[in-house]
Image (cartoon, grey):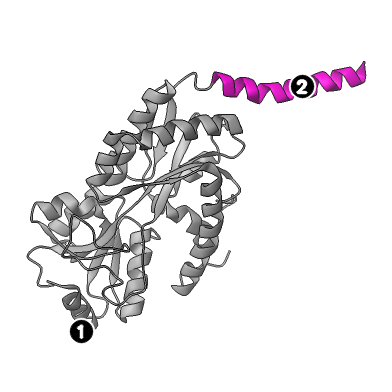
């Protein structure tokens, strides 16, 4: 009788996650993103969520949680139930967090990686009326005025911040960094003259097209279609390419069947023309990774970001 009770309990334990997966989703899903409303991340992820909502059969509600270098959504997963009803954007900064901040969770082991969806296109911009007409002018001014050339980014330890510091290191210049919570505030600051330059994803595209900003360089393998006159970092002599892939994660322990349902819905949503068009506004492209491939990416990126943090001298003793 005792053995039979144990067997029944074990079967019930196996059946519970299966029942959850079969019923999923029975209510709206929350997608937490790392940057404020109105920027390229918000606009493109809202389109993705809208597409996926229609596929999965429940609303996917976007919640903006900016700050802390884009790591707050991933931190929110650590206390969310592992039922698939809370998912989050995972920017590259998440993989740097343990090297700069004391945390009690592991970015690789404590997130269920669902799908990678895209990556940013980046560059450095200045106001159109700036005397810094080219990247050569930028470097010359910085060398003549160490620490006086101000630039903003979307936060401390984000890809724009760290990549600019790596560029500065290779160029032999010292810059003054000013962090912001997102692209919208950053663009206002550089257009109004509070900053001399900004390092950002191509959320700056509308301001460039409106004649308010000038692109000095971009950070991909090739020049961007929207800004064909802006050289890449490689063309300028720096062995740097940065496109900062990002995707969607769920809490650790989310049932595999639920992860698969989320993956399949978001993958189909990525293929919709409306999502591809929203990315195109910012010279971003779909960048699909399956759950397994995204998990492997997390593992290799975690190791690579440690090397970058140490190279820039930003690692903090834990």
The total number of labels drawn is: 2
Image position of 288 with respect to 31: above or below: below
Whether residue 37 is visible here, answered yes or no, is: no
Residue for badge 2: 11
Q: Determine which quarter of the picture holds residue 98.
A: bottom right
**Horizontal and vertical percent position of residue 270:** 37, 37
Q: Residue at x 39, y 29 (%)?
A: 52
Residue at image location 55% in from the left, 29% down from the top: 258
Q: To which quarter of the image does residue 65 belong?
A: top left
Q: Which residues are magenta?
A: 1-23
Q: Which mark is residue 144?
A: 1
Measured as percent of width and height from the top left, residue 196 is found at 18, 66
Quadrant assignment for the N terminus: top right
Position of 293 relative to 13 (above/below): below
Q: Is residue 147 left or right of residue 266?
A: left
User: Nearest the camera: 215 or 275?
Assistant: 275
Left or right, 38 with reference to 111: left
In this rendering, is residue 43 above or below 227? above
Residue 216 spot, x, y in % from top left: 19, 67
Q: What residue do we see at 18% from left, 79% from top?
A: 141
Give the residue at x 26% y 62%: 123
**10 Å neighbourhood of mark 1: few (<14), some, or many (≥20)?**
few
Q: Is residue 280 magenta?
A: no
């Amino acid at each position: 009788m005792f053995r039979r009770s144990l067997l029944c309990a074990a079967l019930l334990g196996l059946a519970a996650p299966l029942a959850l997966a079969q019923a999923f989703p029975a209510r709206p899903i929350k997608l937490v993103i790392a940057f404020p409303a109105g920027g390229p991340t918000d606009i493109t992820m809202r389109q993705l969520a809208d597409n996926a909502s229609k596929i999965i059969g429940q609303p996917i509600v976007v919640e903006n949680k900016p700050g802390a270098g884009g790591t707050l959504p991933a931190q929110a997963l650590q206390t969310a139930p592992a039922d698939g009803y809370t998912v989050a954007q995972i920017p590259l900064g998440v993989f740097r967090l343990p090297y700069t901040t004391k945390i009690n969770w592991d970015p690789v082991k404590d997130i269920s990686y669902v799908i990678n969806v895209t990556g940013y296109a980046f560059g450095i911009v200045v106001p159109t009326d700036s005397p810094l007409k080219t990247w050569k002018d930028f470097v010359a001014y910085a060398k003549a005025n160490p620490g006086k050339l101000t630039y903003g980014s979307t936060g401390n330890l984000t890809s724009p911040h760290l990549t600019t510091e790596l560029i500065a290191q290779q160029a032999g210049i010292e810059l003054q960094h000013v962090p912001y919570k997102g692209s919208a505030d950053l663009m206002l600051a550089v257009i109004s003259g509070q900053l001399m330059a900004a390092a950002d994803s191509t959320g700056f595209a509308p301001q460039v097209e409106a004649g308010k900003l000038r692109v000095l360089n971009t950070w991909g393998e090739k020049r961007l279609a929207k800004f064909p006159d802006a050289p890449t970092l490689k063309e300028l002599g720096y062995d740097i390419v940065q496109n900062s892939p990002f995707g969607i994660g769920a809490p650790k322990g989310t049932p595999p069947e639920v992860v698969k349902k989320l993956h399949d819905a978001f993958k189909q949503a990525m293929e919709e023309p409306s999502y591809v068009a929203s990315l195109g506004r910012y010279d971003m492209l779909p960048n699909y990774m399956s759950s397994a491939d995204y998990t492997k990416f997390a593992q290799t990126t975690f190791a690579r970001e440690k090397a970058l943090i140490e190279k820039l001298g930003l690692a903090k003793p834990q």
